[in-house]
Image (cartoon, rainbow, N blue to C red):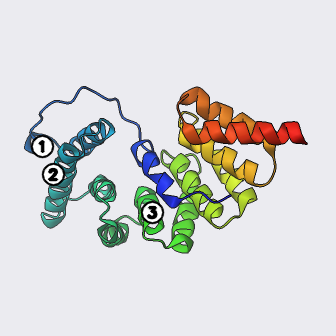
Amino acid sequence: MRISIWLLVPVLLALVVFTQTPAQTVNPATLTALQNYQTGRNLEAQGLMSEAQAHYNEAIRISQDEVWRNIATRDTFAVMTWAMRRLNRHSEVLSWGEQGLRLFPDEYRLIETMGQSLFFMGNHTRSLSYMQRYVDSVPIGGRAPIAYFFKGEIYRLRQQFHNADIAYTTAVNLQPGLPLWWFRLGSVREAVGDFTHAIEAYERAISLNPNHQEANAGLARSRLQMQSN
């Protein structure tokens, strides 16, 4: 079963969860880099991408200013690369991430973010190695669920469905509230004919989002297969 890589787009709104507040005008210049990034995520989740981009760009500006003034911390590079990733500035994620790792070799948040950018640049082999490096170093770190999810994505696209099942299962165990992740898990189980467990995963996705069309379709297919066997 092949699923278009473009179905990844919704997960970008769900990979990091922040408390959403009603959209309001906030002057980016009055906020720190991290506050700008968090505000951008809230605005993006509300569909206000233009406003979100302004905050992402301000987070980048503040972070780069800290680098140029020689007062950068590991958080400086983490926030800057997160904001660049949200803006799909993937080559800059890699270059600034490498600069950050020269200063802070154990800043594994940079490694995970760089792994994401490598994935979207189509370099799945390097992406997988970065995600593996992250989970080997911080197996239950704050970004471990995301790293395992992207490992699952790479294995799924390679049709290594057993490995994808393991990675997705780890991701949903660490962060069980994302319907897309449960749908992906159901899809790889369905692909190998494990309809009983595919149904379980699809049902979890639907319990989180009853309107998830792909999960509903997968559930119907898997139930039909169960009845015909």
- Amino acid at pointer 1: Pro
Q: Which residue is mark 1?
A: 28
Q: Within 10 angstroms of label 2, few (less than 14), some, or many (20 or more) residues?
A: many
- Amino acid at pointer 3: Ile
Which one is nearer the viewer's eye here, 197 or 64? 197
The answer to whether the residue labelled 2 contacts the one labelled 3, judged by CB atoms less than 8 Å apart, is no
Percent of width and height locating residue 100: 32, 66
Residue 115 seen by the camera = yes
Percent of width and height locating residue 17: 41, 37
The answer to whether the residue labelled 3 contacts the one labelled 1, judged by CB atoms less than 8 Å apart, is no
- Label ID, residue 139: none
Percent of width and height locating residue 84: 29, 59
Q: Which residue is rendered at x = 18% and y = 62% of the image?
A: 64
Q: Within 10 angstroms of label 1, few (less than 14), some, or many (20 or more) residues?
A: many
The answer to whether the residue labelled 1 contacts the one labelled 2, judged by CB atoms less than 8 Å apart, is yes
Which one is nearer the viewer's eye here, 69 or 209? 209
